Image (cartoon, helix red, strand yellow):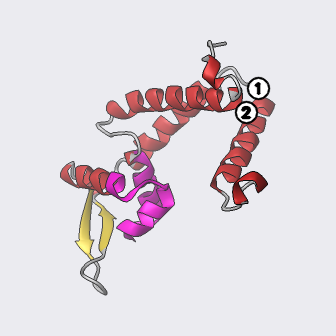
Amino acid sequence: MPHIPTTAGKGPLSYAIFLLARAHRAHAAALLRAMDLHPGQELLLMQLFDRDGQTQSELLESVGLDHSTVSKSLRRMQDAGLLVREPAAHDRRVLVVHLTDKGRAMREPIAALWQTLEETSARTLSEQQAESFIDTAHAITETLTSRALPPEESE
């Protein structure tokens, strides 16, 4: 177990989440680098694999990242030939994002990368532990993203 700084002592769960997120992101980043992708770009591609032709705003909402991060990622991905951004027919100010053939060809490699990441992450967990972790992670995510404030913050 890692040393928890004394200032984080009242939040061991939060510190564990921080350590986990950092380690998971670093491992994912190493796998993505081998595919010439930056972290987060695979999430944008996954959204487009499911529904090509989304607006930049729809992609932004689906991945939950800020506008400048998504815009920068999409620009890099366009420069790499993975997608194109075109003005929408109904409103020239709206950009619609479409995969190129090169972008569509990333589907299976990204699925394989995600499976490798999953297998590595859960290697020492039983099926029950993995399911319990997933449930717990979703519950924490729901709590953190819900609009309702705890009583002490809403006063």
> Which residue is rendered at x = 71% and y = 60% of the image?
154
Marks 2 & 1, CB-CB < 8 Å contact: yes
From the viewer's perspective, tell me whether residue 114 is left or right of residue 102.
Answer: right
Picture coordinates of residue 12 (x, y %)? 69, 26
Tag 2 secondary structure? helix
Q: Nearer the viewer, residue 107 or 139?
A: 139
From the viewer's perspective, tell me whether residue 153 is left or right of residue 48.
Answer: right
Picture coordinates of residue 136 (x, y %)? 75, 41
In the current view of this chain or complex, which residue is farthest to the left? 79
Res. 125 in view: yes
Picture coordinates of residue 36 (x, y %)? 28, 37
Q: Nearer the viewer, residue 48 or 107?
A: 48
Whether 35 is drawn above or below 95: the answer is: above
- Using the rendered view, name the quadrant where residue 70 is placed: bottom left
In the current view of this chain or complex, which residue is farthest to the right? 128
From the viewer's perspective, tell me whether residue 13 is left or right of residue 47.
Answer: right
Q: Nearer the viewer, residue 18 or 120?
A: 18
- Magenta stretch encompasses residue 127: no
Q: Which residues are magenta?
A: 42-70
* Residue occupied by mark 2: 130
Crowdedness near tag 1: few (<14), some (14–19) or many (≥20) residues, C-alpha within 10 Å: few
Judged by its main secondary structure, the magenta piece is helix
Res. 104 in view: no
Q: What's the residue type where badge 2 is placed? A: Ala
Q: CA distance from mark 2 to mark 1?
A: 6 Å
Whether 90 is drawn above or below 25: the answer is: below
Quadrant of the drawing holding the N terminus: top right
Picture coordinates of residue 17 (x, y %)? 62, 32
* Residue occupied by mark 1: 126
Quadrant of the drawing holding the C terminus: bottom right
